[in-house]
Amino acid sequence: MNQVLERLRAEAAGSPGYEALLVAGPDGLADSLTSAGQPLWARELAAYRLGMARDRRAFEPLVLLLNHRDPARCEAAAQALGVLGDPRTARAAAALATNTLRTAYALHPVRLLAALRAPESAPALISTLSRLLAPHDPYWRVALACVEGLGALADARARDVLVRAQAHPRLALAATDALNHLQTRHPDA
């Protein structure tokens, strides 16, 4: 949390609005999310604080931030969404992780899906990993996060895609670990 706040403090560059949002209550934070002309750092700070307070008014702004091109914003949004506990989170993260046009920004949605352990998690990770196993795919970090997430989930449906992932040098070790974990959890699968 402190890293997020420090990053946003730096972005605010001494704006008095930063300190005001740090002490604002939930209604003030929610109002700042819909106020015109707010800078991105202010919207992120308000959404992050609301999400960490489990206030569902943060859901939509956090999902937008989860889909942002800046990895630090995505990571902060994923953290807050994980705490928020909104039942829509897994569907939103699955939609972002499986969107072929946004693969470059899918790392944090993929990690969030693994952490949520929701019914949508394994199917979305399997689908995403399957398309990233093409030769010379540039998104190996997203593929690696899928492999690691599937290993943590230990869902038997992931066996085939994890076996295929073993053929990729950057994924082989993690895929083998994931398959071993899967075998431990589902010895008959």
Image (cartoon, grey):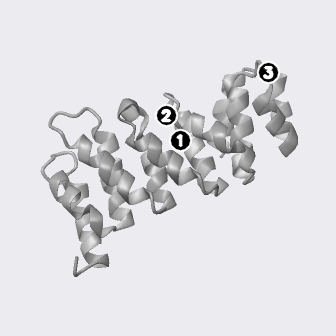
Residue 15 is tagged as: 3
The mark found on residue 71 in the picture is 2
Q: Which mark is residue 75?
A: 1
Relative side of 99 to 11, left or right: left
- Pointer 1 local density, CA inside 10 Å: few below 14, some 14–19, many at least 20: many
What residue occupies the far top of the structure in this picture?
37
Q: Tell me where residue 89 appears, x and y as whole percent.
A: 57, 51
Say left or right for 44 vs 18: left
Q: Can you name the residue that lies furthest to the left here?
A: 167
| Residue type at numbered disc 3 | Ser
Which of labels 3 and 1 is toward the front?
A: 1
Look at the numbered disc 2 and give the secondary structure of its residue: helix
- Looking at the picture, tell me which residue is in the foreground, 97 or 52: 97
Q: Which quarter of the picture shows residue 183? A: bottom left
Q: How many numbered marks appear? A: 3
Q: Secondary structure at mark 3?
A: loop
Q: Distance between the Cα atoms at labels 3 and 1?
A: 24 Å
Q: Answer yes or no: do the residues labelled 1 and 2 have beta carbons within 8 Å? A: yes
